[in-house]
Image (cartoon, rainbow, N blue to C red):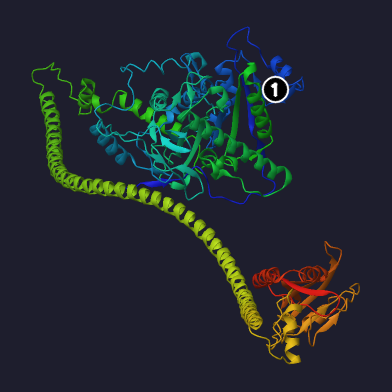
Amino acid sequence: MQRPTKGKTPRRPVTKKTSNTQKDPVGVYCRIRPLGAEDEECCIEMISSSTIQLHAPDGLKANRNGEYKETQYSFKKVFGIQTTQNELFKDVAKPLVEDLIHCKNGLLFTYGVTGSGKTFTMTGSPGEGGLLPRSLDMLFNSISPFQAKRYVFRTDDKNGMEIQNQVDALFERQKRECQLSVPKTPSSKQKPDPECADMIDPEEACRSEGVDEDSCYSVFVSYIEIYNNYIYDLLEEVPYDPIRPKPPQSKILREDQNHNMYVAGCTEVEVKSTEEAFEVFWRGQKKRRIANTQLNRESSRSHSVFIVKLAQAPLDADGDYILQDKNQVTVSQLCLVDLAGSERTSRTRAEGSRLREAGNINQSLMTLRTCMEVLRENQMCGTNKMVPYRDSKVTHLFKNYFDGEGKVRMVVCVNPKADDYEETGLVMRFAEMTQEVEVARPVDRPICSLAAGRRHRNQAFRDELTQRLEEPGGPSNIDDPGVLNHLLDSLPPLPSIDMVDPSDEQTMPRLIEALERRHRIRQMMTEQYSKTANKLKSMLQEFDGNLMAKENFIQDQRGKLGEKEKVISNQKTEIERLEKKSKMLEYKIDILQKTTNIYEEDKRSLKQELESREQKLNRELSERRRMEQRMQGMVTDTKHKWEKECERRVNAKQMELQNKLWVKDEKLKQLKAIVTESNATERPEKPQRPSRERDRAAPQKRSASPTPLPTATPVRPLHRRSHSAGGERWVDHKPPSNLDLGTVMQPIIPSAIKVSAASEKALSKCHKYVLTHQELASDGEIETKLIKGDVFRTRSGGQAVQFTDIETLTQEFPSTSSRKRRSGSGDGPRQAEDHRKMEWDDTENEAPVASTSSAYGYQKRRKP
């Protein structure tokens, strides 16, 4: 059995395109749909066969203050509302079908807003077939006499084509016929589907005249849809499970060895007639997703792609069989695309799944527009920007066409009603921009080196042979009587047997001799015939034996072939299982790759966040260290401050207690003196010494103030010294405007640096700071304040002062207390005693006041 050979994919090995490569612009056509009602407002006017004019409706002009202007757009050709489907096909799709027969690819798609007639243009209706059924009809009308037997061409799963010999194709046909209860190709007895019947008028049928008669052709069709940016096979036969129905599985795009994009695992059906091809199309069309919206009763919710693949290979030199040379096999394809219409959800009022479908449709159309813009910019400006084909499945599938693998044509369908004005304007601008994109012209297929007309000569030879076999004298006329008469005439003639004389003795011997001669010839012929018959019989027996041996051998080979077929079927099943597993693994790999990319992005972002947080943490740690050092310094300073404050308070408390003890001692001494004086008045008078008189007179002089008794040793009150008398180094800041009062109670600050203005140099040498401030008090006297503080070093290396204490020095007149004493001196003893007692109590409750012998008393107060 001969192994099948693989054919070529649609694209040849890629070669670098030179600057002189010929390019053709994308052919853009415009078709205007008739209005739904005669009184409906129209916004499109056809000016010529290639130009239309778009003008804003009256309502929109009124709302926008009449700012809209009329705009003209030019196309390769404009088809008005009176254009028939046949006229549109001849101008748009017929050249693409001719290129398909001549091994060139083609792409034709319809574009427009929803409800503009795209599906009608592509598919049509009964009696008015669209571009797709007319393209199939023209293709089969052209190649029908030259089609190969079914299964001679066979597709593989890698966008390639395999060729089988006649025997393998016959075996596969028999195997498929056994598996299928009904034939795939619809026969003339079967009733055609009413939905696809009478699509094309027989009078409008056309065919291509440039078909190569020395080649064999085979047509394969596939039908897919792109829904929500997922690819689904509309021809896939999935067994229906009523208990657990399975949703359709999406397909993935792959790139073959020649960098062509194709849908992996897509069903490709071999068809042999227009009816069969359109029946396959209609079977997939019933699975296509459509829905009812506010603008269209049957709105397409997906992009449909119908792919017609034509495989052709030349005949051998005798013109009998297909040439088994894979380099001579070519495959071309024509893609007929019905794009879903762009729509605005505010007009369609889509919700839920309809809203998500509309979003995906608009996104894919926007990606198509972006690709066209980038292609135009690269061609016009000489840039080399990357075209975002991979952003959408539609553009990714057809990237080869825009890179120069065939002709690209677009039919822009527009609805002239005023409600679609804004959407139509966007479509017009996109179509105008698309016309500026140029696509490289495909290269012609190289001509086969075999002589032309091989099929015609082989057919003529067969006709001649058949005619010769049917002529008289052939193998079927051997038993004719004329042939026997001719054979008898070849024997020796008999002599004349007329006997005139009875004594004639010569006539009979001559007759006997002639008869004997003829008898001998007849015996020789009989012997020769017997020998030939025996020889033929032996040959027949030998042939029978050989035939039996051949039949036995064939039976053995058939048994082996059955075993091989079982092995092959098992291997195919295993291969299919492995391929499914491979697809699943590839799908999982893609998911894992995407997940890995997401994790990598998260890892990078988290790493960056970690680094930023580490930097922030380091800054916070350094700031914390500096804060700790600062706080330690502040704690040390505060501790030192509070230690001094505690020491000051302890000293003040000791002084207060000493003053209280002194007051009590004074009271006891005065009480003793009073008791002694009262005892002396009761006792008889005795001679007294003069010194005693001075002692007795002393209490009367000190009745106004708690002075010690003459008999006791006077105890001077302990006055709190200023904090400036410590061991620290002080800065004595006295402004030059201060007045020198000359009082006795002045702050004593030893080894102080006296300055009239504070300076950093002076502060750097000291630990304490005191500021002398003078102001007028409420009684009109001068009040002196000593503002004290601690000097500490700042982070920047400078000096700062923190104020901690304020001491206030005031002046008082002693005249009031003197008058009180004088006024109380003339009272009786009882009154004097009460007055002294009251003064003692007041003295006990009041804080001690330091006074001097000068004219003014100087009092020092402390404010915390």
Return the x and y of residue 258 as percentages of the image width and height.
50, 49
Q: Residue furthest top?
A: 39
Quarter of the rendering containing residue 544:
top left
* Above or below 779: residue 127: above
Using the image as rendered, state which of residue 127 and residue 804 is in the foreground: 804
* Label 1 secondary element: loop
Task: Give neighbour class at mark 1: few <14, some 14-19, many 20+ (Cα, 10 Å).
Answer: some
Which residue was labeled with disc 1?
A: 50
Left-right relation of 284 to 509:
right
User: Where is residue 705 shown, x and y percent of the image?
Assistant: 73, 75
Q: Is residue 574 left or right of residue 618?
A: left
The quadrant holding residue 690 is bottom right
The answer to whether any part of residue 696 appears in the image is yes
Name the residue located 67 percent from the left edge and 33 percent from the top edge: 435
Q: Residue at x 58, y 40 (%)?
A: 444
Give how far across and how far down residue 508 sits, in percent.
10, 24
Residue 413, placed above or below residue 682:
above
Q: Quadrant of residue 69?
A: top right
Q: Nearer the viewer, residue 702 or 43?
A: 702
Q: Amino acid at mark 1?
A: Ser
Counting from the top left corner in percent of width and height, residue 422 is at 66, 24
